[in-house]
Amino acid sequence: TYTHRTADYMLSTAQDYRKGVRGEQHHVWQATLDEKAVVFTQHPGKLPIPEGSPIPPDWTWQKEDEPGPGYWTGEASLPRSAQHRNVGIHIYAPQYTPIPFYGFDYLRETHAYFPWAHFDETPIQPGPWTFGRKGDGFVALYSLLPTAWRTGQPEVFENGGLPFDLVAPAVPVGPGDPFPSNVWIVECGSAEEWGSYEAFRAAIASASVTATPLGDEDGNGATDGFDVEYVSPSQGVVTFGWHAPLTVDGQEVPIADYPRFENPYVEAGFDEQRNEISAGDYGLMLDFVSGDRVAEGPAPKLPGFPN
């Protein structure tokens, strides 16, 4: 799991995790601008309410969507995902044929949660990109397939009757049932990094994206997604594919086999039994063999007591 965090946004991804297969309660990636202004994509397993049908008064997401894969819970097919700092690429390509009789079905679409109600400006859609701003945090979301806002389904998390569901239906490319293969790209930014929301939008809306569809290299009857090249205004040329590695400006970026923790506060491998965490004058030592837990830091400054 990779996370890039600034004062204005956080982007997190579970990288290259079981691509193409079902996942009941998986949540592969998310851009977080505050508690409610979040964006993520998902391949839904089923529509919560048939189109045009009334929503029952006792309808609840927990009852109807769990354990998944439901409409927002889990993944009917997991994407192949990777992230570098503030940029993420997510390739959906289901690797199994749906069998509705046995409950292994999925919708012929992918979609994004992008709630209008929780952004400070109504999302803007120039071409394949959708942009949102919350405070000084910005998010841009790209879909290779054309998108449209779905309405008439149950509310999720206090959206005040405003749109939140950005849907990319499958496009048939030949005879037979279309697979909902798609490419979603996310890039986050901030006023500190860009100066203005307008500058962020203008740069990304003009950025080049190339997605090359692949054949059935696995021989399982399903196409293998895409090879993607995205010329990010902030990171340079980013490439990634269903089988290809993540590269940035021609240099491969590892998406696996990194330490258990690798951040400014602690570095530790998966098999290390002692973790030492520090931030400024504060520290924490955890020893999983002895069971010791030692915290260090300045003594608290209490009113009326010498320090």
Image: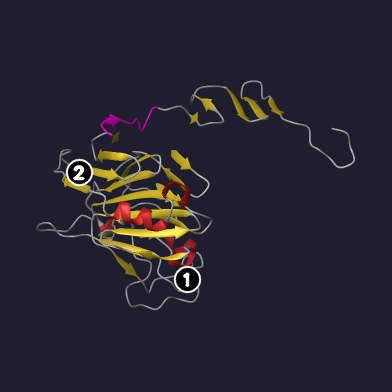
- Residue 305, by quadrant, is top right
> Which image quarter: residue 44?
bottom left
Q: Horizontal placement of 181 versus 257: left or right?
A: left
> Where does residue 181 sit, x and y in percent of width and height?
23, 52
**CA separation in Å, label 2 and label 1:** 37 Å
| Other residues around mark 1 within 10 Å, as few (<14) / some (14–19) / many (≥20) | few
Q: Nearer the viewer, residue 130 or 83?
A: 130
Q: Which residues are magenta?
A: 249-257
Q: Residue 59 has which mark? A: 1
The residue under label 2 is 224
Measured as percent of width and height from the top left, residue 222 is found at 18, 47
Q: Position of residue 149 (x, y in %)?
A: 33, 68
- Give the residue drawn at x 40%, y 78%: 54
Q: Secondary structure at mark 1?
A: loop
116 relative position to 293: left or right: left
Is any atom of residue 173 visible in this view? Answer: yes
Establish if 231 lies above or below 39: above
- 196, 218: nearer the viewer: 196
The amino acid at mark 1 is Trp
Report the residue at 18% width, 42% height from top. Answer: 220
**In this picture, residue 127 sits left or right of residue 31:** left
Kind of residue sitting beneath label 2 = Asp
Which is the main secondary structure of the residues drawn in magenta?
A: loop
Considering every residue shown, the one lying at the far right of the view is 304
Is residue 186 placed above or below 157 in the rendered structure? above
Position of 300 relative to 45 (above/below): above
